[in-house]
Amino acid sequence: MERRIRGSSLNGYLKFIKKKWGTSGMEQCMRDIGIDDMTFKDGHYYQDEVVGNVLRWVHREKGREAVVEAGGSILHNLGILSWLVRFANISTLAEKFPKNYSEVYTFGKCWVDTSDPKNITISFKGVGYYEEACLAWEGICKEALAMTKTKGRVTHTKCERLGDERCVFLVEL
């Protein structure tokens, strides 16, 4: 299966770069990774490699924490969803995540376990094949806590890239 991602997510990362480091930062990123002559439409799908290149650029130029922050910005800036999620609890949001994942990505799989009231476990298969993808997912999990005003901690406990069967994020509440 071809690894594709919706243009809205790709544009979200580019908007994050523009907001954080200005138009010149976004243009530099696009130039450096060879997409400066491209535009991405929200409703279309594009090669996941483009997002990987954007995230690797952020990591190389701005550091690990900037990639985590970029992941969080994707969840936070989804328009009405970011407004509505303030009225949901973290477990409800997590339970809906696998369906939302499958609407954005054409590859990989996501599972969520909310059976333990003190922990939520989010697992991904076929997603964590480069470090920056894992960092972005960490940021998305952290932003979900922030948006639902839930105190907690996110830990990346297993990683496909390091030989585990799946990437697993533990959200301790």
Image (cartoon, rainbow, N blue to C red):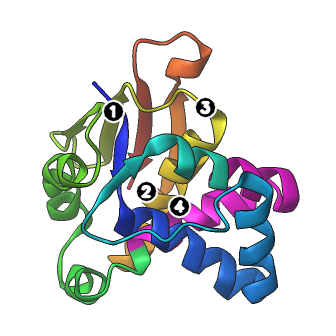
Residue type at mark 1 is Ser
Question: Which residue is the site of mark 1?
Answer: 123
Residue 52: within the magenta? no
Question: Which residue is the site of mark 4?
Answer: 71
Q: Are marks 1 and 2 in contact (CB under 8 Å)?
A: no
Q: Residues within 10 Å of mark 2 (few under 14, many from 20)?
A: many
Going from N to C along the chain, the mark reached first, 1 or 4, is: 4
Instruction: Tell me the residue at 51%/54% (across/down).
Output: 153
* Element assignment for label 4: helix
Question: Which residue is the site of mark 3?
Answer: 130
Instruction: Tell me the residue at 60%/47% (across/down).
Output: 135
Instruction: Tell me the residue at 26%/85% (across/down).
Output: 86
Q: Residues within 10 Å of mark 4 (few under 14, many from 20)?
A: many
Which of pointers 1 and 4 indicates the residue nearer the eye? Answer: 4
Residue type at mark 3 is Tyr
**Is 97 above or below relative to 160?**
below
Quadrant in which the C terminus appears: bottom left
Residue 56: within the magenta? yes
* Element assignment for label 3: loop
**Is 71 above or below relative to 47?**
below
Q: Residues within 10 Å of mark 3 (few under 14, many from 20)?
A: some
Residue 170 percent coordinates (x, y)? 42, 40
Going from N to C along the chain, the mark reached first, 4 or 3, is: 4
Residue situated furthest right in the rendering:
61
Relative placement, left or right, of 104 versus 95 is right
Q: Nearer the viewer, residue 130 or 97?
A: 130
Residue 152 percent coordinates (x, y)? 46, 60
- For the magenta stretch, what is the residue range? 55-75
Q: Are marks 3 and 2 in contact (CB under 8 Å)?
A: no
Residue type at mark 4 is Gly
